[in-house]
Image (spheres, grey):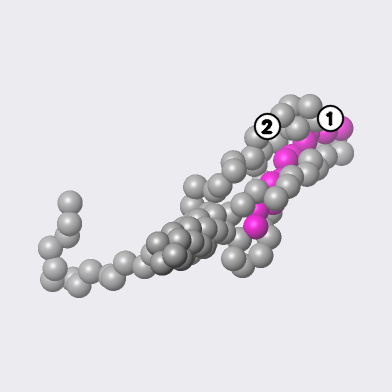
Amino acid sequence: MRIRTIGWSLLGLAVVVLACYALNRGILVGSRIETARLSDDYPVPFYKKHCRYLFFTGIQQVWTGSESTREEAENSSCATLKREPVIHRRHKPANPGDPQPH
């Protein structure tokens, strides 16, 4: 009986750690396509894809790129998890007299 309790506790801890990691990197929750024009003199539109990610701090929208057709914009992909985390580890600033690491 005690082994099952430890197993469930470890599984619960693993789920919490994975959820925290995913929310720190951002979870893709949707995207939308926006039509834009460069100017009134250049009437040909281009399409921008905006991806929405869920973080600890809320939902953030990221512009991924622009395409010449709506189909190309719809087919362009959003990253499942962003490369840069929201919460960064902080490093202690080096003292001026300390040797610099290589």
Q: Which residue is mark 2?
A: 76
The answer, for residue 3, to whether it is visible in the render is: yes
SS category of the residue bearing label 2: loop
Image point (70%, 35%), residue name? 66
Number of numbered discs overlaid on the protein picture: 2
Q: Position of residue 92 (x, y in %)?
A: 28, 71
Q: Earlier in the sequence, mark 2 or mark 1?
A: 1
Magenta stretch holds residue 49: yes
Which disc, if any, is residue 30?
none
Q: Is residue 6 left or right of residue 36?
A: left
Q: Is residue 70 left or right of residue 78?
A: right
Q: What is the chief secondary structure element of the magenta stretch?
A: strand
Q: Position of residue 18 (x, y in %)?
A: 50, 56
Depth order, front residue of 81/38:
81
Question: Which amino acid type corresponds to the residue marked 2 in the rendered image?
Answer: Ser
Q: Which residue is mark 1?
A: 44
The answer, for residue 39, to whether it is visible in the render is: no
Image point (45%, 61%), residue name? 4
Depth order, front residue of 24/41:
24
Image point (20%, 72%), residue name? 95
SS category of the residue bearing label 1: loop
Q: Position of residue 21 (x, y in %)?
A: 49, 57
Q: Position of residue 41 (x, y in %)?
A: 85, 35
Looking at the image, do the residues carrying marks 2 and 1 touch, with CB atoms under 8 Å apart?
A: no
Question: Which amino acid type corresponds to the residue marked 1 in the rendered image?
Answer: Val
